[in-house]
C-alpha cells in the first residue's frame, strides 16, 4: 500500500510542478465515501499467509484497511495524502485520492485495467484526472518512469507491482466480480532469509599466531533493511504510553540489533517473551502498539514483525 501512496503522491507533485495546472479545473470539491477504519483484513491477511489458505476482500474491506493505515493522513514531503478510496469492478480499478499539496486540497481520480501476470500486478491507467482536468496517461507514465523503487516499476505498460516482495508466499491472486482473492502457501516467517547470509574468511591472532576463521554477516541489503526498521522503532518506542508497551518495543529492537551483529543469534527466547507480554496487554495497548508500528514502518515490515513475534 505504501508503494501506491508513494506513486500517487509523487505523480501529483510532478504534474503540479511541471505542467502548470489550471487551478480552477484542478481544485474541485469532492467528499470521499464514508468508511470505518478496521484492521480485520490485515489480520486475516497475516493469518492466512502463515497457515495457508485464501483471503477474499471486497472494496469495502479494502477501504476499511486503507482508512486504518492512512488514518488522518500520510506525508510525503510537501504532499499529504488525506484519504484514498478504491473500487474494483471486474478487471478494472478506480482510485480516488484526497491530497493536500502545499495548502491546496485536490483530488486525483485514476481508473484503469488490472492485469495479473504470474506474481505481478499490472495496473494500466486509462483515465486520470486532477479535479476536472484530464491528464494524458502517456505523459503520466513517462514521468513516472523516473520513480525507482524495488518491487515497484512504472513504464509505458503501466504500474507494475511485484507481490513477491511481500514477506509471505503468495500462491495466486485474482480479481473477479469485484472481489480480490489472495491465496497463500503456509510459510514460517523469519527476520531474514538464510540464503542472505555471507560467509567470509577473516584473519585473526590466536596465541600469538595468525590464523583464519570463518565469520558470518548479512548481505548489505538485508542488513540495511533490518537497521532501518530498528531505527524506525525509536519513534514507535517514544509513542508508547506504558512501561509494558515500551518493554515490548525495546525487546524487538534489541533483537534486531543482535541479529544484525550475529546472523547466528537465536532469538526464540525473545519471540516467546514478546508473545507473552503482548497478549497480557489490555486491548487499547495492543491497538496502540500496532497503530504505532503501522504509522512508522512499511506495511511489509510490520507484517513480518507481528508474524515473527506473534503479535
Image (cartoon, rainbow, N blue to C red):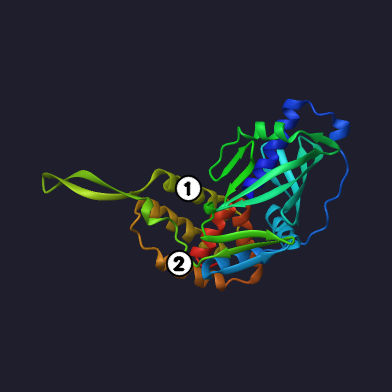
User: Is residue 238 rendered to the left or right of residue 82?
Assistant: left
Query: Up-down: is 220 above or below 244?
Result: above
For disc 1, the neighbor class at 10 Å (few under 14, some 14 to 19, many from 20) is few
The quadrant of the rendering that contains the C terminus is bottom right
Q: Nearer the viewer, mark 2 or mark 1?
A: 1
- Secondary structure under tag 2 reads helix
Dot 2 or dot 1, earlier in sequence: 1
User: Is residue 232 rendered to the left or right of residue 220?
Assistant: right
Residue 39 is labelled as: none
Tell me what residue is drawn at x 44 percent, y 55 percent: 256
x, y percent for residue 6? 65, 43
For disc 2, the neighbor class at 10 Å (few under 14, some 14 to 19, many from 20) is some
User: Is residue 216 rendered to the left or right of residue 277?
Assistant: left
Q: Could one spot residue 78 in this view of the protein?
A: no
Tell me what residue is drawn at x 67 percent, y 63 percent: 39
x, y percent for residue 113? 71, 48
Q: Distance between the residues labelled 2 and 1?
A: 20 Å
- Secondary structure under tag 1 reads helix
Q: Nearer the viewer, residue 228 or 199?
A: 199
x, y percent for residue 130? 80, 38
Q: Could one spot residue 76 in this view of the protein?
A: yes
Q: Nearer the viewer, residue 294 or 123?
A: 123
Question: Disc 2 marks which residue?
Answer: 271
Question: Disc 1 marks which residue?
Answer: 225
How many badges with numbers are in the image? 2
Amino acid at each position: 500500500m505504501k508503494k501506491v501512496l508513494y506513486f500517487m503522491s509523487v505523480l501529483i507533485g510532478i504534474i503540479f510542478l511541471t505542467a502548470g495546472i489550471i487551478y480552477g479545473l484542478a481544485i474541485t470539491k469532492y467528499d470521499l465515501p464514508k468508511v470505518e477504519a478496521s484492521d480485520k483484513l490485515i489480520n486475516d491477511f497475516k493469518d492466512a499467509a502463515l497457515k495457508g489458505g485464501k483471503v477474499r476482500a471486497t472494496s469495502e474491506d479494502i477501504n476499511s484497511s486503507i482508512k486504518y493505515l492512512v488514518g488522518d493522513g500520510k506525508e510525503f514531503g510537501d504532499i499529504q495524502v488525506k484519504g484514498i478510496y478504491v473500487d474494483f469492478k471486474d478487471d478494472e480499478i478506480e482510485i480516488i485520492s484526497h491530497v493536500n499539496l502545499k495548502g491546496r486540497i485536490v483530488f486525483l481520480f485514476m481508473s484503469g485495467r488490472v492485469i495479473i501476470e504470474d506474481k505481478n500486478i499490472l495496473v494500466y491507467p486509462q483515465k486520470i484526472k486532477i479535479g476536472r482536468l484530464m491528464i494524458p496517461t502517456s505523459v503520466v507514465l513517462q514521468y513516472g518512469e523516473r520513480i525507482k523503487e524495488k518491487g515497484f516499476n512504472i513504464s509505458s505498460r503501466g504500474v507494475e507491482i511485484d507481490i513477491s516482495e511481500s514477506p509471505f508466499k503468495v500462491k495466486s491472486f485474482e480479481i473477479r466480480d469485484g472481489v480480490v482473492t489472495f491465496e497463500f502457501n503456509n510459510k514460517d516467517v523469519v527476520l531474514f532469509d538464510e540464503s542472505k547470509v555471507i560467509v567470509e574468511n577473516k584473519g585473526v591472532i590466536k596465541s600469538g599466531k595468525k590464523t583464519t576463521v570463518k565469520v558470518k554477516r548479512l548481505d548489505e541489503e538485508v542488513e540495511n533493511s533490518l537497521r532501518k526498521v530498528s531505527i524506525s522503532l525509536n519513534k514507535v518506542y517514544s509513542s508508547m504510553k506504558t512501561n509494558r508497551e515500551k518493554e515490548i518495543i525495546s525487546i524487538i529492537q534489541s533483537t534486531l540489533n543482535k541479529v544484525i551483529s550475529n546472523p547466528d543469534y537465536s532469538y526464540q527466547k525473545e519471540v516467546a517473551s514478546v508473545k507473552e507480554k503482548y497478549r497480557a496487554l489490555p486491548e487499547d495497548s495492543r491497538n496502540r502498539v500496532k497503530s504505532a508500528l503501522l504509522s512508522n514502518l512499511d506495511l511489509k515490515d510490520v507484517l513480518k514483525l507481528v508474524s515473527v513475534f506473534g503479535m
